[in-house]
Image: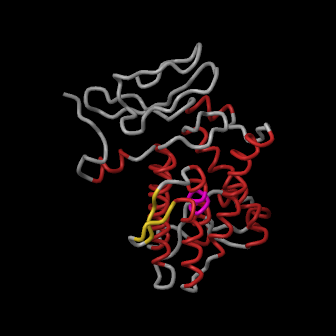
């Protein structure tokens, strides 16, 4: 009998493996870098966003690392760092496990990666006004906002209080405002999130135009639909990617509850390779 992988398994490895592809790697990178910086294993000042260092010293890694450092563990910001990390896990996982906005990859992994790249670029652009050094929280709030627009009738909760998904961003904003916390991080993330939602969902429906298109290299790497890695061989894990040689119409997203099941294979357009091998 094959061993079913999922949240019912016990143990950190099974829990980690149960997460979707992008969420798993993003969360792991954030935890490793955030903890390493707080333990002074990595120099925080070399990872945050400083435009002058990028321009004059060509430290181009600063375009990416500010989105992987969540913040400090001090008394002032430790609680916010932990909560934002939980929000990353919760809402990135929910968005990626479902069918996201379709910008060419049927709402699957390719589209989600493109959505994150779009958010990172726009957060950097809007940061000309907001002038922040740590940008990871804004990217998390961006994902949360897009999730609330994609699944507006879903149920969420704040400290046990049920809140409809379409009101969750504003409830969090109001809560932080009333507590006297830095609510402008939410404003920046929500602003970019609304821009993505408008371009990815409203414009195609209202104006019949599609300005956001997932790049071909992402579709080639991850295919159309959810990323499905090869099934383990002889009980051992396997790595790889699903590559489609041709792109026809929109594909389907496999059920996220059992992404590696080899018993249910799907055809992804004419001339494409079968997934889930």
Rendered image quadrant of residue 2: top left
Q: Where 257 falls versus 233 (above or below)?
A: below
Residue 128 position, x and y percent, is: 78, 68
Q: Nearer the viewer, residue 134 or 183?
A: 183
Q: Is residue 72 above or below residue 112?
A: below
Q: Is residue 124 left or right of residue 19?
A: right
Please tell me how many numbered marks the rendered image carries: 0
Front residue of 241 and 182: 182
Query: Does 214 lie within the magenta span?
Result: no
Residue 142 colored in magenta in the image: yes
Say which residue appears at 62% left-offset and 65% top-offset. 138
Q: Is residue 178 above or below residue 198?
A: below
Name the image quarter holding the C terminus: top left
Q: Nearer the viewer, residue 34 or 189?
A: 189
The quadrant where residue 101 appears:
top right
Q: Main secondary structure of the magenta part?
A: helix
Q: Residue shown at 73%/73% (left/top)?
A: 131
Task: State the image quarter where residue 161 is shown.
Answer: bottom left
Seen as rendered, the residue at the extreme left is: 1
Q: Residue at x 62, y 50 (%)?
A: 116
Height in image: 169 above or below 184? above
Q: Quadrant of the N terminus?
A: top left
Residue 134 lies, in percent from the top left, at 62, 69
Residue 72: % across, % down? 50, 76
Q: Which region of the structure is painted magenta?
A: 140-145
């Amino acid at each position: 009998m094959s061993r079913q992988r999922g949240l019912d398994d016990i143990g950190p490895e099974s829990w980690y493996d149960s997460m979707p592809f992008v969420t798993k790697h993003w969360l792991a990178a954030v935890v490793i870098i955030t903890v390493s910086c707080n333990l002074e294993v990595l120099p925080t000042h070399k990872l945050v966003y400083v435009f002058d260092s990028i321009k004059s010293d060509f430290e181009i890694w600063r375009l990416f690392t500010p989105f992987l450092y969540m913040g400090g563990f001090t008394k002032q910001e430790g609680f916010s760092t932990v909560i934002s990390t939980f929000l990353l896990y919760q809402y990135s996982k929910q968005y990626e496990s479902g069918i996201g906005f379709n910008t060419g990859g049927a709402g699957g992994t390719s589209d989600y990666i493109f959505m994150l790249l779009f958010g990172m670029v726009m957060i950097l652009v809007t940061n000309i006004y907001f002038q922040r050094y740590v940008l990871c929280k804004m990217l998390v709030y961006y994902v949360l906002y897009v999730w609330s627009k994609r699944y507006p009738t879903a149920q969420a909760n704040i400290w046990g209080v049920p809140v409809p998904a379409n009101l969750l961003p504003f409830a969090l904003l109001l809560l932080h405002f009333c507590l006297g916390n830095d609510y402008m991080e939410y404003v920046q993330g929500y602003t970019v999130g609304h821009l993505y939602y408008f371009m990815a969902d409203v414009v195609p429906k209202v104006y019949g135009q599609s300005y956001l298109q997932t790049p071909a290299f992402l579709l080639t790497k991850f295919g159309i639909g959810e990323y499905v890695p090869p099934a383990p061989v002889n009980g051992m894990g396997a790595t790889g990617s699903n590559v489609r040689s041709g792109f026809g119409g929109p594909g389907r997203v496999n059920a996220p509850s059992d992404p590696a099941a080899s018993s249910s294979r799907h055809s992804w357009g004419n001339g494409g390779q079968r997934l889930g091998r």
